Amino acid sequence: MIALERLNSISAPDFAAALASIFEHSPWVPERVATLRPFASIIALHAAMSAAVFEAAEAVQLGLIRAHPELAGRAALRGDVTSASTSEQKGAGLSALTQSQLTRLQSLNAEYANRFGFPFILAVKGHTPDSVIAALAERVNHDAPQERGVALQEICRIAFFRLMDLVQEPLGDAIIAMAEKLASLSEDRDALTCSYLTPTHQATAARIRDFMMAAGLDAHIDDVGNVVGVLAGGPNRKRVLTGSHYDTVINAGKYDGRLGILLPIAVAGSLRRGGTKLPYSLEIIAFAEEEGVRFKSTFFGSRAVAGRFDLSDLDGVDAGGCTLSDAIRAAGHDVAAIPAIARDPSQVACFVEVHIEQGPVLLEAALPVGVVTDIAGSVRSAVTVEGRSGHAGTVPMTLRRDAAAAAAEMVLAVESRCRRQPGLVGTVGKLDVPGGAVNVIPGRCEFTIDIRSAGDALRDAAAAEISTALGEIAARRRVKVEQRRLLQAASVPCAEALQDAWAASIERVTGRPALRLPSGAGHDAMMMAGLTEVGMLFVRCGNGGISHHPDEALSAADADIAARVFQDFLLHFEGPT
């Protein structure tokens, strides 16, 4: 392997020579980007080379496509192809085809070449012979300009996999670059939004799968949309599971959830390329849904893995009237297969999650990482206040039944109660006057309440008192109040042994004692606690600890420290066999 730092500093001819194997028999690609150095990341280098490919003249593009051998063609069967191509085809099973598969593939290859004048190109990593044949059978019906574009895209995917195996960079830089790449996929032009099973969400899943395969993981997307990658280890040990979610809130930051996917991928790739084999298999799960943005229910991904998926949720609808079951089917998944996603507890050693803190404690303590002790439970409610509308200028103040004024007092009641005891927080996150107007007394107001604490008894007592207070306010103000429970999740303690293991890794890597702190936010680890013991590592975030916001920040230096802590944890973990 060659360090990116060195690629950035060597002569242009040496740079092109070092990358000559990335694009098949086409050294002109790295030659064209040598003057654009330095590159901040491998992903940035790949983006520059891909841009050079798509900006090239059509004749040059056709030359690049024709430089590739046919899949399982005569050259491949003779072994007369590059070592990279040989390895890739062998990995997809194309060197061990049945006679019927070989006949079908060669027939389609001939039809394709006759139609387009160039060989069928497919990044075969992650494919099987049957899926290769299916892709060829579909693409042979494209028109020529469309197929040339698809072929170039596949060539660039092949180049990405090759590049990731050839070039190395600091783990922190790799993590930040992957997060930036994922953030370029969004439902909104000017903000990051990725909600469950939208086209953006499915494109994000495909990109995460590519990251996993580039790291050398055996990767697939399951029937709830989770992206699962496995780094094979010793065969006789229980698996260690890790991961987090890749869906986002509306107008999100780049690191919430996604750090806990990308950091393990970077570490797994580093271990594999370094020849280190863990005594157990590591399973990285990018959970498809945690935020509840589209279907107003949460943790679809981790609940499926933990065997806690509620099939009644399949009848839930989004704002456009699409049911969850229809969305899953439209994405190409099998609703009936969801129960089979559940892992066997007897085969799981633990679940660990890496996550940005989403708060300022580590920032104030000047520490890059910390150990999570507990994950706070939450009670969420939707509240509707019904009063009486009226003209803003003609109804005396003493005769009003103002729903918004009553709601305002209720909001203050939530704040007052939750301020009284440390470790308790209460939030009114949504507040709305439907159909309100500047000159109309509000007749209806709607808001939400989210009460959290690491202590369930403390939280539930506060929720009950607030509920009573809302009823008293409504009676006094002559309005009606309806309270509807949306969620009640118990707090989850992190396993003491895993806390200690995280702390030991932090001390070995940083030379400083580990800070232990609770999590006020909910995480996929809460659902996984029903399957196995859980542990969490918090990573410092900048900008005052802000999260669920575009200003969410993480430094490459902190990501690198967290990655080294995670790697140390894996290397020292001695869970059950």
Image: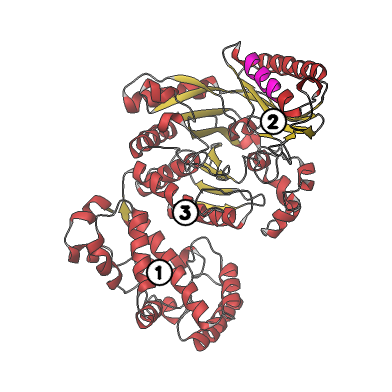
Q: Which numbered disc flags the more N-terminal residue, 2 or 3?
A: 3
- Where the C terminus falls, by quadrant? top right
Nearest-to-viewer mark from 3 and 1: 3
Q: Is residue 561 among what the camera can see?
A: yes
Instruction: Tell me if residue 537 comes above or below residue 24 in the rendering.
Output: above
487 or 507: nearer the viewer: 487
Q: Which residue is mark 2?
A: 448
The crowding category of the residue bearing disc 3, from other C-alpha atoms within 10 Å (few below 14, some 14 to 19, many at least 20), is some
- Residue located 64% across and 53% down the image: 197
Q: Secondary structure at mark 3?
A: loop
Q: Which residue is mark 3?
A: 184
Measured as percent of width and height from the top left, residue 441 is found at: 75, 32
- The range drawn in magenta is 408-417
The crowding category of the residue bearing disc 2, from other C-alpha atoms within 10 Å (few below 14, some 14 to 19, many at least 20), is many
Q: Secondary structure at mark 2?
A: strand
Q: Secondary structure at mark 1?
A: helix
Q: CA distance from mark 1 to mark 2?
A: 56 Å
- Residue located 71% across and 19% down the image: 463
Image-quadrant location for residue 278 = top left
Instruction: Tell me if residue 413 comes above or below residue 312 in the rendering.
Output: above
Q: Are marks 3 and 1 in contact (CB under 8 Å)?
A: no
User: Identity of the amino acid at label 2?
Assistant: Thr
